[in-house]
Image (cartoon, rainbow, N blue to C red):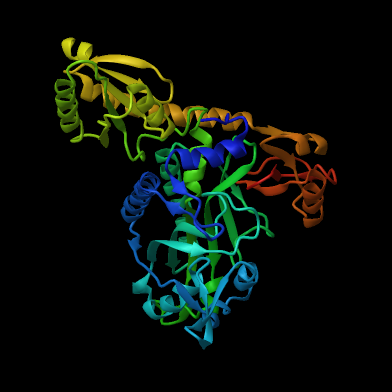
Amino acid sequence: MEVSKENFPEWYNEVIEEAGLVDKRYPVKGMHVWLPYGWQLMRNIDEYFRYIFTKYNHQEVYFPLLVPETEFKKEGEHIKGFENEVYWVTHGGTTPLDVKLVLRPTSETAMYPIFSLWIRTHADLPLKIFQIVNIFRYETKQTRAFIRMREVHFFESHTAHATAEEAEEQIRENIEIWKKIAKKLALPYILVRKTEWDKFPGAHYSIGAETIMPSGRTLQVATIHQYLQNFSRAYNIEYLKEDGTHDYVHQTTFGMSERLVGAIVGIHGDDRGIILPPEIAPIQVVIVPIITKDKEKILREAKKIKEELQEHFRVHLDDRDNYTPGYKFYDWELRGVPLRLEIGPRDMENEQVILVRRDTFEKIAVKRSEYISKIEVLLKEIQENLLHKAEEEMREKIKEFDDLEDVKNHKGIAVVGWCGSYECGEKIEKLTEKKIIGIPMEKRKGRCIICGKETDMMAYVAKPY
């Protein structure tokens, strides 16, 4: 790496390509080519999504990409929120379409006309589905790989329930699911309730999971939305109740995207490259033979080690013969492989291997008779250490202030008293040149930093991506 992480924007742009995650040279702004290593990382995250949501009784579906304008416009607040971001398809070949089509910016307007056909009675509820697709938004701000894209790899779950209470229970369940996902990815976060002017278009309320990047700017990495009956009324999603009356369903959604990869890269990386949490790393252990004299003997031993380890871990043997061990060390450190295993002539004589941690660079000599169990322990320790270190660093960037100038100059999340009014919220954002990214999930007493009124509400103020 030529750029230090202290210069985060340049470091981030360089490390993503150097580590082989994506190629940003695709000739459409805001769209990139996933390279094999980066795509495997994303696939590992996707597979965990599939596992955890299936465990919580969601079923996977796949809806079409194109949404008719007639369906897109049924929910007024939703279209108002997305009308400047959508891509329109207006022609089929050279023939103008009778009804324009939208490339999905998210899937409410694609799914909910079909929900109205699927859901007839209380026996059809709850409906809990998810899909992993690409969405498209005409992003006008500066694009940045994973963080702000025009084509976004996206996860979304959608649920429908008989009552508001059941929908609220789903929100609580989604929060529990997110805790497990964040732990799997070793990501620190805070949960916030979005302001009325920043919630998802058409939602009753929205909850965001926010993390802090090394630049001090926040990154929203997951959102959970309570719709109540806002969409079901627009799309006529009714069900027959047990008492013979009809009612509209109550709905929730949960969304995440490739931003999670951007957060992993930014939060865990260092001046040598990225550092991947073992539980989702494409390669957990890379084997590097240290070849001096008897090349064939050492390579045979390295292949034997690979055969032994691949029953337990995701393993790669770097047997490239045109690169030195030092170059290979550098290459795999850049790519963030959690654990490196070295095997050379002296190690063979001593019936041992050398294990090197990517997070601390600690070198450990381990007997061959014990190395599989030791690797298991080390991968678990690396996973826990990455999360613990990231949580500590994030805590240091969250501070409470009662002076707006301090809020403006703070790199991270500033916590301030807020009465909840739009007027005071607007002044906070204008005077600090930042945004209220949300309010804490728990109430706390204080005084509004603008009007001085006593309040039980605090605001998180930061500069978001």
* Left or right, 15 with reference to 447: left
Residue 186 place in picture, x, y as percent = 44, 36
Query: Could you tell me residue 147's position as x and y percent?
Result: 55, 49
Q: Is residue 271 above or below residue 253?
A: above
Q: Is residue 243 above or below residue 250?
A: below
In the rendered image, residue 239, in percent from the top left (x then y), is placed at 42, 78
Task: Return the residue nearer the eye: 374 or 262.
Answer: 262
Q: Residue at x 74, y 46 (%)?
A: 434
Could you tell whether 267 is left or right of 463 in the image? left
Relative height, residue 42 to residue 28 (above, below): above
Which residue appears farthest toward the right when viewing the image? 451
Is residue 189 something one can see in this rendering?
no
Residue 460 quadrant: top right
The x and y percentages for residue 63 are 39, 71
- Residue at image coords 57%, 31%: 3
Residue plotted at (55% across, 28% down): 392
